[in-house]
Image: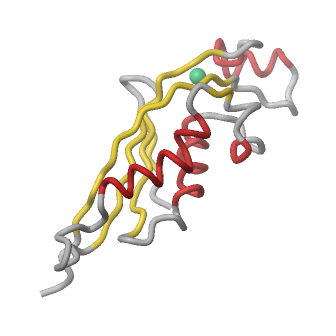
Amino acid sequence: MGEQKLYVTRREVFSASHRLYNKKWTDERNVKIFGKCSNVYGHGHNYVLEVTVVGTVDPDTGYVIDTKELKKIIRENVVDKMDHKNLNMDVDFMKDVIPTAENIAIKIWEQLENKITNGKLYSVKIYETENNYFEFKG
Ligand code: NI
């Protein structure tokens, strides 16, 4: 029998503002591509983040990763840095990208990948609205 892999997901929420804008383009082109998401003074979202870790169950603890530990890693490295912030201006690890949900998922992955040592990071899923979600698997 192979390894029994188990997937553990922790959900967190945060609120943040952003503006979708490519500074290489004219304002006209930005409005054409991004529409109202290019509004000069930004707009906000209530983001839902789901982080999934995959691993085998430790026979001593019965855990893949202690969810208290996973919660702490996500809060310290992601939520505390993004919640109630402007993603274009306030968040160091977002500064070189347009803050679409796609890029947010990738950047969150990069923040977490090396921090998770019990099990392995499997996916980062970000819900920007009730109807859209974006998933990165490394
Ligand atoms: Ni938006």
Q: Quadrant of ligand 1?
A: top right
The image quadrant that residue 7 belongs to is bottom left
Residue for point 41% across, 55% down: 123
**Relative side of 8 to 71, left or right:** left
Residue 92 position (above or below residue 89)? below
Q: Is residue 126 left or right of residue 59?
A: right
Residue that appears at 73% across and 31% down: 88
Q: How is the image coloured?
A: secondary structure
Tell me where residue 119 appears, x and y as whole percent. 36, 70
Residue 111 place in picture, x, y as percent: 58, 55
Horizontally, is 30 left or right of 121 in the view? Answer: right
At x 23%, y 72%, the residue is 5
Indicate whether 101 appears above or below 9.
above
Question: Is residue 23 or residue 78 the one in the foreground?
Answer: 78
Whole-percent x, y for residue 130 in the image: 36, 23
Figure label count: 0
